[in-house]
Image (tube, rainbow, N blue to C red):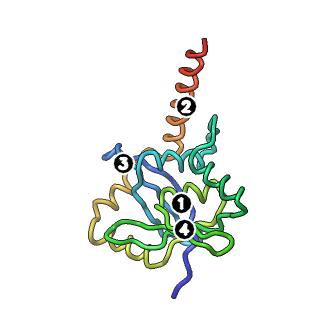
Amino acid sequence: MSAPVPMRVADVRRPTEHPEKRIVVLEEIDGERLLPIWVGFSEAEAIVIELEAIELPRPGAHQLSHALLRAAGGEVAEVRISTVVQHVFYATVVLADGGEVDARPSDALALALVAGARITAEPAVLESSAHFLGVRRPEFAAEVAGPHDGASVLADETREELAQRIRKVAELDE
């Protein structure tokens, strides 16, 4: 059995052709392979917040989860994209004590970024994804590679949205 492949979150994208979608792109650290994972809007936003170091006025769900885990004496050691079944990705959060917790990849990746934990992918997941994108659904490969707004654009939008919310709250206090 091959060892999990070290990865990093390279980008969060909003494809031009499908602006309602978000794609988290993982990149092999010592290689060239990419692993695109379609995620929900709020999960993508949580990942962008961590990638772009956006300061929140209060902790988000992933910051809270990490703080609770640490308060209980635990630590996230690794997040592993562990399998893909019928084009649905699954992740495992590996704790420092060896415990494992099943998670959605989007939540696990956001938690990994908060915790500064390793991100890996099983080789079979990378192979399956490459086959799916290259052979079975090349239009998805084009969507991943095509024009898009990346994490920095999404981060600017998130910062502006947060600023608007803060202004609205301040107006209520007047």
Q: How far across and down, in percent of the image, does residue 44 sit?
A: 47, 49
| Category of crowding for the residue at label 2, using alpha-carbon neighbours closer than 10 angstroms: few (below 14), some (14–19), many (at least 20) | some
In the rendered structure, find residue 83 and report the number of the disc placed on it: none
Q: In this view, does 72 lie to the left or right of 92?
A: right
Q: How far across and down, in percent of the image, does residue 36 sit?
A: 43, 61
Tag 2, which secondary structure? helix
> Closer to us: mark 1 or mark 4?
4
In the rendered structure, find residue 162 and report the number of the disc placed on it: 2
> Closer to us: mark 4 or mark 3?
4
Q: How far across and down, in percent of the image, does residue 62 sit?
A: 58, 51
Question: Which residue appears farthest toward the bottom when viewing the image?
Answer: 1
Residue type highlighted by circle 4: Val
State which tag comes first along the sequence, 4 or 3: 3
Q: Quadrant of residue 128?
A: bottom left
Residue type highlighted by circle 3: Lys
Tag 3, which secondary structure? loop
Tag 4, which secondary structure? strand
Question: For the residues marked 2 and 1, what is the alpha-carbon distance in whole angstroms?
Answer: 24 Å
Q: Residue at x 72, y 56 (%)?
A: 71
Residue type highlighted by circle 1: Ala
Q: Which residue is drawn at 58% across and 56% down?
A: 111
The residue that disc 1 covers is 108
> Closer to us: mark 4 or mark 2?
4
Q: Which residue is drawn at 31% across and 70% down?
A: 86
Question: For the residues marked 4 and 2, what is the alpha-carbon distance in whole angstroms?
Answer: 31 Å
State which tag comes first along the sequence, 4 or 2: 4
The residue that disc 4 covers is 101
